[in-house]
Image: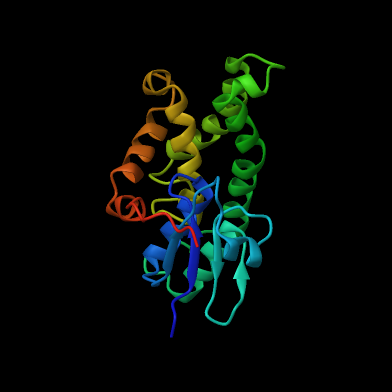
């Protein structure tokens, strides 16, 4: 039987967190790395929005949201207990990450597209979330306790992007616990696995 098909883009944070859940669940999928300029016809056929990740299951079901893909994968197998944290606490953090923080991140990364404010203003907006995460990490090793959860994995790729905008600033910023947390994910075998390069799928 053919494998589920995962349309992905290596550097997309949404695709990144979906891949991490699929990998940790040890689910075999056919990864189709897309080009943002030439999206495959089949991707647009099953998901006209044309954004990744998109997972087509063997029964034809299509999951178009990264969190849905994560939940599906972890429901099959959750060997590290990512779903063990309080769902309300998980959802609260991810909602901020995917909402206000992602908005600030986009403006911080691309200030020329958002000339209403200086880049530093957008960074300060994003820092409101960083401060919350730093406070949590002062209490325990991960965002919601002493073990990682779906919240850590769902948020990590976006913090990675924020840190990379001005790496020198982040390295000396007032978030030492967050830096350790981020580096732990960056150096993890799981992250190395999901960041392997796949040939671009063009059919």
* Coordinates of residue 78 in the picture (x, y in percent): 42, 69
Q: Residue at x 59, y 17 (%)?
A: 119
Residue sitting at the far bottom: 1
Compare residues 71 and 89 and report the one nearer the observer: 71
In front of the other: 117 or 123: 117
- Which residue sits at x=57%, y=82%? 59
Q: Residue at x 63, y 13 (%)?
A: 118
- Answer yes or no: is residue 200 visible: yes
The residue lying toward the viewer, choosing from 1 and 45, is 45
Residue 134 seen in this snapshot: no
Answer above or below: position of 131 versus 85.
above
Instruction: Write down the quadrant of residue 121 in the picture.
Output: top right
Residue 155, position as x, y percentages in the image: 51, 45
Q: Residue furthest front?
A: 203
Q: By what rule are the colours in the image chosen?
A: rainbow
Total numbered labels: 0
Return the residue found at the far right: 116
Residue 73 position in % (x across, y down): 48, 69
Quadrant (top left, top right, bottom left, bottom right) of the N terminus: bottom left
- Indicate whether 94 appears above or below 53: above
Q: Please determine whether, in this image, residue 28 is positioned above or below residue 19.
A: below
Q: Quadrant location of residue 68?
A: bottom right
Where does the image place residue 8, in percent across and percent down from the top left? 49, 56
Task: Kindly indicate the quadrant of the structure image that contains residue 79.
Answer: bottom left
């Amino acid at each position: 039987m053919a494998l589920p098909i995962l349309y992905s883009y290596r550097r997309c944070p949404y695709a990144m967190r979906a891949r991490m859940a699929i990998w940790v669940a040890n689910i075999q999928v056919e990864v189709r790395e897309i080009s943002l300029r030439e999206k495959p016809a089949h991707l647009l056929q099953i998901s006209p929005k044309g954004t990744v990740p998109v997972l087509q299951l063997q029964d034809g079901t299509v999951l178009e949201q990264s969190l849905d893909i994560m939940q599906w994968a972890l429901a099959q197998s959750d060997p590290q207990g990512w779903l063990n944290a309080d769902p309300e606490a998980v959802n609260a953090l991810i909602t901020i990450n995917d909402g206000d923080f992602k908005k600030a991140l986009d403006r911080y990364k691309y200030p020329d597209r958002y000339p209403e404010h200086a880049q530093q203003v957008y960074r300060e907006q994003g820092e409101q979330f960083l401060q919350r995460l730093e406070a949590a990490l002062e209490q325990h090793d991960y965002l919601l306790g002493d073990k990682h959860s779906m919240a850590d994995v769902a948020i990590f790729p976006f913090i990675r992007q924020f840190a990379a905008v001005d790496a020198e600033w982040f390295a000396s910023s007032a978030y030492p616990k967050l830096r350790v947390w981020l580096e732990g994910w960056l150096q993890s075998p799981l992250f190395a696995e999901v960041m392997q390069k796949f040939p671009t799928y063009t059919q």
